[in-house]
Amino acid sequence: MRDGTLTRSEFATIVEPIQQQIHTLLLEGSNYPITKGEKTPLAKTVRTCQRLLTVEPALWTFVTTVGVEPTNNAAERALRPAVLWRKNSFGSQSEAGSLFVSRMLTVVTTLRAQNRSVLEYFVEACRAAR
């Protein structure tokens, strides 16, 4: 569809049997009998299927909505610096540290998405705080 070889309606027609098959499998998976509070792998799978069924229409938004990508590559790319920071620094040791890091990473990610200088922003923020 990206390269123009398929129209959105043709794409939706191709995806429809896949949607139906996944719906059938989710229903099948959600109907296995489990007890309340059961912690087995089967129970976890059943609960996952049940939760997916509640949001199933959202799984297919990319089929009907222009501009919605079928992947989460943008989100993965945005999270990558935070994952690498945590891996290399062993995370933070306090709630305050975690809050600071989450805020800083959010600001840096936002600034980079806006093609703005992180250093200039922080210099201006410090000046404004004085």
Image (cartoon, rainbow, N blue to C red):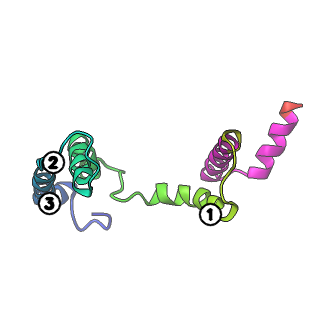
Residue toward you, 83 or 122: 83
Tell me the tag on residue 18. 3
| Span of residues in magenta | 98-127
Amino acid at the residue labelled 1: Lys
Residue 96 in the figure: left or right of residue 24? right
Residue behind mark 1? 87
Residue 44 in the figure: left or right of residue 92? left
Q: How crowded is the residue under tag 3: few (<14 C-alpha within 10 Å), some, or many (20+)?
A: few
Q: How many labels does the image show?
A: 3
Image quadrant where one finds the N terminus:
bottom left
Marks 2 and 3, how far apart in space?
18 Å
Q: What element carries label 3?
A: helix
Looking at the rendered image, the disc whose residue lies closer to the viewer, 2 or 3, is 2
Tell me the tag on residue 30. 2
Tell me the tag on residue 106. none
Question: In the rendered structure, does residue 120 fall within the stretch colored magenta?
Answer: yes
Amino acid at the residue labelled 2: Ser
Q: Where is residue 72 in the image (x, y as percent from the top left)?
A: 41, 57
Please give the name of the residue rendered at 25% of the width and 43% of the height, measured from the top-left corner: 51
Marks 2 and 1, how far apart in space?
36 Å
Question: Which callout, 2 or 3, points at the residue further toward the start of the chain?
Answer: 3
Residue toward you, 3 or 130: 130
Please give the name of the residue rendered at 16% of the width and 59% of the height, measured from the top-left corner: 15
Question: In the rendered structure, does residue 111 fall within the stretch colored magenta?
Answer: yes
Q: How crowded is the residue under tag 1: few (<14 C-alpha within 10 Å), some, or many (20+)?
A: few
Looking at the rendered image, the disc whose residue lies closer to the viewer, 3 or 1, is 1
